[in-house]
Image (cartoon, rainbow, N blue to C red):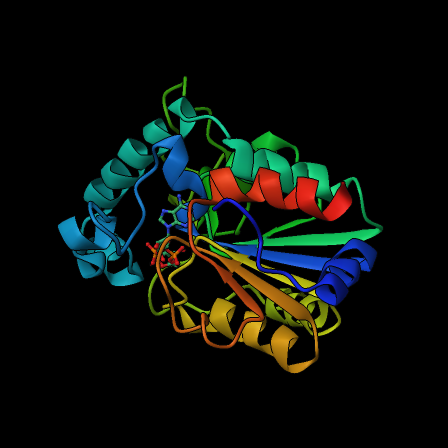
Amino acid sequence: MDSFPFSKNDLIRMRNAKRITAITGAGISSESGIPTFRGEGGLWRNYRAEDLATPEAFAKNPDLVWEWYDWRREICANASPNPGHLTLAKWETLVPDFTLITQNVDGLHPRAGSKNLYQIHGNIFTARCLGCGNLTDIDPKKQREDSCSICRSKLRPHILWFGETYESGLLESCFKRTSSSDLILIIGTSANVSVPASMAKEGIRNGALSIEINPERTSLSNLVDYSLQGKSGEILPKLLDEIYK
Ligand code: OAD
């Protein structure tokens, strides 16, 4: 993308935006070498979610499920945040109120320095006790624990699986953020999962200026003010320069 299609008035709105919410999906991490879910080479094209990402699959074959997450965690541990992640972390330092809602479990946003962050689908570096709910960090360099250090119950990946509901209170907080935002950024998500897509729509309905960044069009492309087609690692740094130049 050589130049941005923004009107002068919208550029001023972007520059003056005090409450900004970014919603990210797997696409922002694809330039870090982490596979997405639905695109070419996407995980759901090669694996059946029913076998690996449901409570029933874990009950049936916990070792297989852990193995799959161990494999993915290793990819994430060996990856580094790209300019897309780094730009969002920098952006947070420039405005009074910046919230990042990510569907990603890869840990690259916190590693890039993002602080005001909701990881709504969990974190691949965390295990959760099936008994007491205690959360434990998983150190990718060490042997993973199988049972809880407090109550000895079995541990599971701290990931939101298909058929599960979001943590209580989490959605309310996210919807509150998006519905009161001046600017919404929707980055690297196919918008196939309805809840995060609704968060974006809620912000748009409430009058936020909205920008989508994605090489492909999605169901949100016609709803946003600007649909920027391209890679987030390339567009985001330029966008920040354009707004705050
Ligand atoms: P998807 O795999 O559904 O979509 C990834 C999106 O990223 C697609 O729209 C791509 O066009 C776009 N994309 C690819 N490369 C990009 C790049 N360099 N820059 C910007 N965008 C790029 O991933 P999500 O929308 O994140 O849930 O999927 C949502 C959820 O579905 C995931 O969190 C996961 C999955 O089931 C759970 O595991 C709970």
In the rendered view, would you say 97 is above or below 70?
Answer: below
Q: In this figure, what is the number of numbered marks?
A: 0
Residue 166 in the figure: left or right of residue 191: right
- Quadrant of res 87: top right
The residue under the point 77% across, 63% down is 13
Task: In this rendered view, identify the residue nearer to me: 82 or 150.
Answer: 82
- Quadrant of res 242: top right
Q: Is residue 151 visible?
A: no
Image coordinates for residue 76, horizontal then vertical, percent: 39, 31
Image quarter of the C terminus: top right
Extreme residue toward the top, this view: 141
Image coordinates for residue 181, horizontal then vertical, percent: 73, 67
The residue under the point 58% across, 70% down is 225
Task: In this rendered view, identify the residue nearer to me: 216 or 74.
Answer: 216
Image coordinates for residue 73, horizontal then vertical, percent: 36, 33
In the rendered view, would you say 213 is above or below 94?
Answer: below
The residue under the point 51% across, 44% down is 2
Image coordinates for residue 22, horizontal then vertical, percent: 61, 56
Task: In this rendered view, identify the residue nearer to me: 70 or 203.
Answer: 203
In the rendered view, would you say 110 is above or below 205?
Answer: above
Q: Is residue 168 visible?
A: yes
The residue under the point 75% across, 72% down is 180
Task: In this rendered view, identify the residue nearer to me: 129 or 179.
Answer: 179
Quarter of the render that holds ligand 1: bottom left
Residue 107 in the figure: left or right of residue 146: right
